[in-house]
Image (spheres, grey):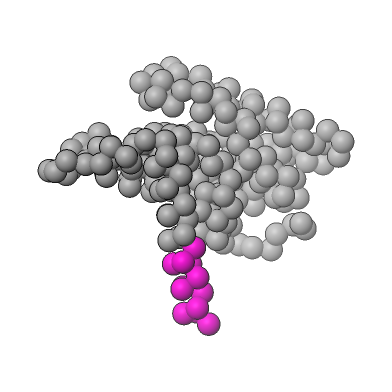
Amino acid sequence: MAATTKSNSELFLNGILNENPIFRLALSMCPAVGLTTTMTNGLLLGIAVTFVQVFSSCTIALIKDYIHPRIRIPTYTFTIATWVTVIDMVLAAYVPGAYKAMGIFVKLIVAFAIITMRLETFACKNNFVKSFWDGLGMGLGFMFGMMAIGFVRELLGMGTLFGYKVLGFRTLLFFVLPAAGFFCVGLMMAIFNYVEFKLKQKRR
């Protein structure tokens, strides 16, 4: 992949819509299935991933000319791990309740395929500014996906949104069980792709 010719706004929207990490690229499915029982979880992990994606992309964009091709993947991993450590300590210090709820998933950001993939396919071939907007778009796209799934599961499974009761009737426990994660991800992925397909047809 050569250096991109897309504008900053196109790069930003690309991560949210055209190459959404969850609904389009089907990457980082473990947190999408396991942690989306509430919108709060999706929001907080989305913020953490956005932080790591943006700072990792910017770091690699700055040092790409000094990375030997044979050690590029270890370099990406070390860079991601550094920023994950930063956000891990910040969450543990300032939002311990949410940090406890997210558990090991914060540390597992190091292994999230979407971050490494963007460093390899984009940040190592583009400048700082382009990498910033690409990282921001990808991070927010991940957050959007997590919160969208969390919205469905929390509303239908517990009758709440962000912990506040919004439904006055008994909900379905199924939606907060692990199996529902696969069901919701698959269904929303199909809807997302169908809507995009219809929009492309209209543009033609």
Question: Percent from the top left, x then y, of residue 120?
Answer: 73, 45
The majority secondary structure of the magenta stretch comes to: helix
Q: Is residue 171 magenta?
A: no
Quarter-wise, where is residue 168 in the image?
A: top left
Name the side, left or right, on which 64 lies relative to 22: right
Residue plotted at (51% across, 28% down): 105
Name the side, left or right, on which 75 lies relative to 187: right
Q: Which residues are magenta?
A: 193-204
Measured along the vertical axis of the image, is residue 132 above or below residue 107? below
Question: Percent from the top left, x then y, of residue 54?
Answer: 58, 40
Question: Percent from the top left, x then y, of residue 137?
Answer: 53, 50
Residue 125 visible here: yes
Residue 16 visible here: no
Please state which of residues 120 and 193 is positioned toward the viewer in this rendering.
Answer: 193
Q: Residue furthest bottom?
A: 204
Residue plotted at (42% across, 55% down): 187
Please state which of residues 68 and 38 is positioned toward the viewer in this rendering.
Answer: 38
Residue plotted at (68% across, 36% down): 59
Q: Is residue 199 magenta?
A: yes
Quadrant in which the N terminus appears = bottom right
Please state which of residues 204 and 57 is positioned toward the viewer in this rendering.
Answer: 204
Quarter-wise, where is residue 181 in the image?
A: top left
Q: Residue furthest left?
A: 168
Residue plotted at (60% across, 36% down): 112
Q: How many marks?
A: 0
Question: Percent from the top left, x then y, of residue 130?
Answer: 64, 52
